[in-house]
Structure formats: C-alpha cells, structure tokens
Image (cartoon, grey):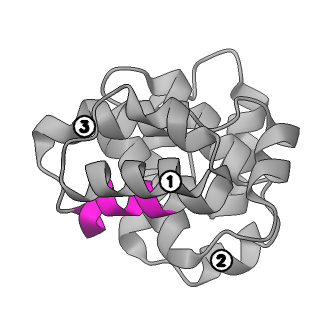
Amino acid sequence: DLGKAAETARRVAAGKAGVGAPPELSKLGFSGFERAFLTLWARGKAPPDRNADLAAFLRQLPQDETSLVGYIGDAMSEETLSALVLAAERALLPSDPPAAAGLLCRLTAVRRFGMLWMFLGPRENQAAAAVLRGASGGADAEAIRASAGKCGVEL
C-alpha cells in the first residue's frame, strides 16, 4: 500500500520511528526496508540513543540464509552493505554477538557479495572482524570461519 509506505517513510524521516516500525517495513520489501534503514542510519550519524531502533531494523531481516538471499535479490548496494555491517557492529554486537555474526554470515550469501565487498573499505573490514571474532567461540564456528574467509578477515 503506497499510503502506508509514505506514512512510514515520513515517520522515519521525522525521526519518530520506534521499535514498532520495522514490522511495517518488512511488508514493503527490501527497497522499502533499505530506504527506511538508510534514513535511520544517516551515514553512521544516528545518535547512540537510536541503537535499539537500528537493532530492531536488523532483526527484521530474514533469519535464514535462503530467505535473506531471496528477500534482497540483486538489490544490495555498496552503501547498504556497508551500513548493515557497521550497524551490526554498533547496535547488535554489544548486546547479542551471535545475532550480529549470524547477520553477517547470512549477508555473505547475498548475490554479488564478493564484488560489493571489494569496494568497501577498512572500516567495514574492521567491523566484520569485530563481529565475527565476537561470536567465534559459539555454535556456528564453521559458518563464522567461512564468512571470515569471504570478508578477508583473520579470526
């Protein structure tokens, strides 16, 4: 519904989107999620009191690899990948290292991940290393090692 999308976008742009906003965004598809998330992220300038909102957005992404790949399709951009990785480090890693690492592991399966990753810089590499190291002793050790290889990160 275009009216719902416009209302959600207005709330996010006004900085009034709360934790309840992400479920509405999931109905908009990845492009709607991406627009709202990048607005909230504000190129990394979102204030620290918005970390809970960032984490809520990230948790709305599909929780299994196949669903995430299908949800994103070919729509991932460098800017969005960068924002997702940096936000995972900032908003998920401190409170839930396995969730942060799981998101990064799922992102490495997205189409064109390798090509997009090549264009990212040292900040994203450092964030990926922190996220993967933060959960490297967990149950998904094999997936974390594989993701570290795709990101060029040594654990």
Q: Which of disc 2 and disc 1 is earlier in sequence?
A: 1
The residue under label 1 is 3
SS of the residue at dot 1?
helix
Name the residue type under label 3: Asn
Q: Which residues are magenta?
A: 35-44
Please tell me which of labels 3 and 1 falls first in the chain.
1
101 to 37, vertically: above or below:
above
Instruction: Name the spot of residue 2 as percent of width and height, x first.
Output: 57, 57
> Are the residues at dot 3 and dot 1 in contact (C-beta closer than 8 Å)?
no
Residue at 79%, 70% (x, y): give it. 74
Residue 79 in the image: above or below residue 55: below
- Mark number, residue 139: none
Left or right of 72, for residue 11: left
Task: Using the rendered view, name the quadrant where residue 65 is placed.
Answer: top right
Q: Nearer the viewer, residue 10 or 58?
A: 10
Q: Residue furthest top?
A: 139
Q: In the displayed structure, does residue 101 sit left or right of residue 122?
A: right
Residue type at mark 1: give it.
Gly
Instruction: Identify which residue is drawn at 73% across, 67% down.
Output: 113
**Is 123 colored magenta in this rendering?**
no
In-image side of 105 versus 85 (left or right): right
The kind of secondary structure element at disc 3 is: helix
Residue 126 placement, left or right of 114: left
Label 1 crowding class (10 Å Cα cut-off): few <14, some 14-19, many 20+? few
User: How far apart are the alpha carbons under marks 3 and 1?
Assistant: 27 Å
- Work out whether mark 3 precedes mark 2 in sequence or the reverse, and give the earlier one: 3
Disc 2 designates what residue?
Answer: 116
The residue drawn where x is 53% and y is 26% is 99
